[in-house]
Amino acid sequence: MKRYFLLPILLTITFSADGQNLIPNPSFEAVSAVTDDKICASRADFDGRVQDWFSPTDVSPDVYRIRKDNSLLPETFRLPQPVDGQCLAGIMTNYPYNICQTYREYISIPLKEPLAIDEYYVLEFWVTPGESDTYQLGVYFSEEKIDLEQCGMLEFSAQFMAKDTLQKGEWKKLHFAWKPLKPYTYLTVGNFERTAEAKRQYLFLDQFSLIKRTRSREE
């Protein structure tokens, strides 16, 4: 059974499109020439491989360019096929590590413009697990850039959290609708759940979209 916990409470509303995607490089396609199907070695390595996105903490999320012969590789070495284009990102959402209570990776990005207070927005992106399991993923909007020298969990309350049971290779689109109360300018994605079990969990992410919508009617 799949379960979602969305904060704040979502409104039952019909929307129409009203604007551009506010997330630059939404499918991680703008990458450096050195990007391949290998994990990133450091925070600086991730930040240098992909345009616009960055690691808000001192850990190394990953960005991959999937090789054309990906399906010919042994399954244990095969990365998922991206939803869009040739590239995708990967984050360790939880991992037992002796330096951190739970080692966690996050990815952040500056929005193209601050969010308008009391306007409606829809955020969508795709996720698939490295292994079949139940995963928790959170979304945190902030007014300031997060830049911390740590490897554990970010001590912020995510505006949205989703918990889902996914099979390896199964892509799931997450969808959140809301109206912000502050002019947020940054988006951060990762695991914000304080009660998560300390076991290895890895997620691939692709095709982000954040669009302002015009509310047409309420049900």
Image (cartoon, grey):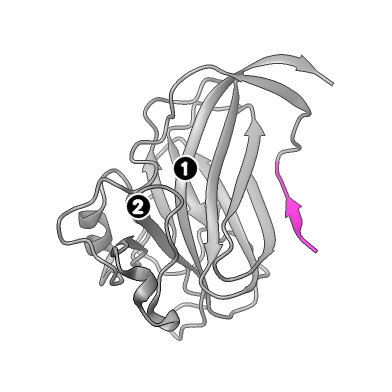
Q: CA distance from mark 1 to mark 2?
A: 22 Å
**Of the pair 198 and 10, the residue shown nearer to us:** 10
Query: Which residues make up the magenta segment?
Result: 1-7
Q: Residue at x 47, y 42 (%)?
A: 208
Q: Neighbour class for label 1 at 10 Å: few (<14), some, many (≥20)?
A: some
Residue 218 - label: none
Is residue 145 visible in the rendered structure shown here? Answer: no
Residue 208 - label: 1
Q: Is residue 88 left or right of residue 95?
A: left
Q: Residue at x 54, y 62 (%)?
A: 128
- Find out whether residue 185 is within the magenta segment: no
Q: Position of residue 29 (x, y in %)?
A: 30, 47
Q: Is residue 9 left or right of residue 77?
A: right
Q: Residue at x 56, y 61 (%)?
A: 191
Relative to 80, say whether 123 is above or below.
Answer: above
Q: Neighbour class for label 2 at 10 Å: few (<14), some, many (≥20)?
A: few
Q: Are marks 1 and 2 in contact (CB under 8 Å)?
A: no
Q: Position of residue 38 (x, y in %)?
A: 28, 72
Q: Position of residue 83 (x, y in %)?
A: 46, 51
The amino acid beneath tag 1 is Phe
User: Which secondary structure lies at badge 2?
Assistant: loop
Residue at the outermost right position = 219
Residue beneath label 2, please?
A: 147
**In the rendered view of the protein, which quadrant contains the C terminus?**
top right
Q: Position of residue 214 (x, y in %)?
A: 62, 15
Relative to 201, say whether 17 is above or below.
Answer: above
**In the rendered view of the protein, which quadrant contains the N terminus?**
bottom right
User: Which secondary structure lies at badge 1?
Assistant: strand
Identify the mark nearer the N-term, 1 or 2. 2
Residue at the outermost bottom position = 98
